[in-house]
Image (tube, coloured by chain):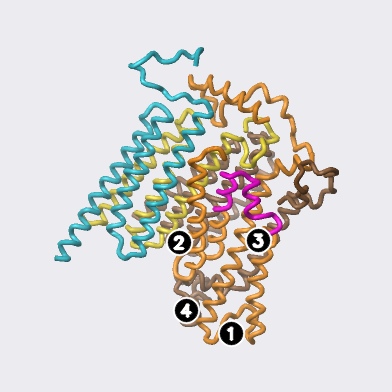
Amino acid sequence: MQDDPVIRVVTKVLTPAIMLFALYVQFHGDYGPGGGFQAGVIFASAFILNAIVFGMNRGRHVWPAKFNLQCIALGVILYGGTGIASLFMGGNFLDYNVLSNDPIAGQHLGILLIEFGVGLTVASVMVGLFFAFANRTQHLRLLDLPSSSDDGTSSKDKPKANAKPKAKAKTNTKTNGAKAKQVSTAK
Amino acid sequence: MEFWINAALAIILTVIGIMAVSQHRLFAVIILSGAYSLVAATWFVVLDAVDVAFTEAAVGAGVSTVLALGTLSMVPGKEKKRPVEALPLSLAIATGMLLLLAVADMPQFGSPDTPVQQHVGPHYITQSEKEIGVPNIVTSVLSSYRGFDTFGETAVIFTAAIAVFLILTGWTRKKIITKPKSKTKSPELDV
Amino acid sequence: MSELFDFLVTAIAIISLCLGSLGVVLGALGLIRLGDVYQRMHGAGIVDTGGAGLILFGLLLLSPDWTVAVRVALIGMLIVFTSPTATHAIARAATLAGIEPILARRSRKKPQKDDA
Amino acid sequence: MEPQTALIVTLAALAIGVFFAFIRATLGPTAFDRVLAVNTIGTIAVLVISVHGFWAGRPEFLDIALLYALINFIGTIAVLKFFRFGTLGDHPPRHKEDA
């Protein structure tokens, strides 16, 4: 997918728009549908689209593994921290009235902070999961482990036309040729 | 008019469910589960549950389809055929019957005089504007009245993610990388 | 004067809604009747540009206040960005998978299978 | 002919559109017909949610329509990458059956 200029350009244009939409959903949660959880998922889908189109290494370069794990913890710390802060200010745990001078403003601030914490956690979890799943092949290669059923050689000579039902349209004879070449080159 | 839309969506949902269960090609199952989430999200839209529709569309149709596709390259394309044993099947049918029995005497869908609606609900609906001042009652209940519970949910997401990373990226496996393959620093933490 | 203006706006909105729904039906029909993946993309294109464009334009005129209008415009812009790209990606994947487009039969003989 | 009836007419036309696209999704000989049909069903779903939002007088649905147009694009790109490379990652899949 990396070699297709159209998709690269459109992804470059779309990714900031998706992130902006995620932030809109995040901070719009008080007045309409949306909130931390949905915003986190949309934020993660921007990174996933980037990783799919520009390749895993570029994707991993954008959000490194270590920072990704730290962000998961950071979200939960932000949430718990707001609770502890309201403890210090005299209220009980997670009671936002005391967070600022008048209760309503305190509630708004508290809800804003914890929604941001939830969004951060969910976004980094989804991105981490995607890289953990999609990067498995590279990881196994580095660990030099045979994958669960490494019978690569046997199925080399009978490549299927496509995953869908085996309806052999007349154009598909050429597909088998192309698929075989593709499978061998990709090996 | 509303009833017919609900009925049509319910039928479509069950048809997609049956197709997904009877399908053996894992790729088709993933796409059908994406379609299932789309129809469920549309149904929540018709039922006026906007936040749930939002989450269902974002998570069900979007991320879970892509995550499942990400894993599909590691598993064979077809589901292995297993004979249907008698005991689990009968257990499943028995629990199904019990649930149907329980559904029979649940209160009518959305009727106001059930204990659930009477207990704390009215206080939230009437006081939410004064106490918290957030127009969207769902958000005010979710993050302020029920803030401690949502804190628990965030902690659950956190632990689930850490568990997945522990299993998948081999922290538990003894280190096999003797000499780093690629010239770059061998990613001991390759999440 | 403004009453006439409102009437005109709703009239235009209703016309564009009907034309848009016609576009969607025709596009979907094209999706079925056309013979090959590449021809069916024209049908899908009609659904995206003709159908979605006109329907969203009608909704734009019907929207009560500007916040709703902005969201409808955003949806229209997103569809203009993503749908042609998706169709392009499908066409590219199809050609790389080796599916041959059915070329015009009348002008020259269809290429034989062996020398394809 | 007020706006409400026009919206209902549009909903009916969109339902017909979904029905036609669903026929193509089931019939489609090659996998790319199916991806095209599912993509069209996604776009029509966006339109259904928007028109239903306007008909029911609830403009919050437009956020869901915007989100779904986005998800539809990402899903199509992921499926196409899976068709071509057999995996979403960079390396060819270990399991070679009919990836």
Q: For the residue marked with disc 1, what is the amino acid?
A: Val
Q: Which chain is brown?
A: B
Q: CA distance from mark 3 to mark 2?
A: 23 Å
User: Of tags 3 and 1, which is closer to the observer?
Assistant: 1
User: Residue D45's mark?
Assistant: none
Magenta stretch bounds: A46-67
3 vs 2, front mark: 3
Residue drawn at (57%, 46%), measured in percent from left and top? B65
Q: Which mark is residue A98?
A: 1
Q: Is residue B67 magenta?
A: no
**Residue C50 vs residue A151, the one in the foreground:** C50
- Check disc 3 and give the amino acid type: Ile
D83 vs B123: above or below: above
Residue B133: give its label.
4
Q: Are marks 3 and 1 on the same chain?
A: no
The span from disc 1 to disc 4 (Cα, nearest Å) is 15 Å
Q: The chain drawn orange is chain what?
A: A
Q: Residue at x 63, y 71 (%)?
A: A79
- Specify whether residue D55 is in view: yes
Mark 4 vs mark 3, CA separation in Å: 28 Å
Percent of width and height locating residue B138: 50, 69
Report the chain holding disc 4.
Answer: B
Q: Chain of mark 2?
A: B
Pick whichever of labels 3 and 2 is earlier in the sequence: 2
Pointer 3: what residue? B157
The crowd level at tag 1 (other Cα within 10 Å; few <14, some 14-19, many 20+) is: many
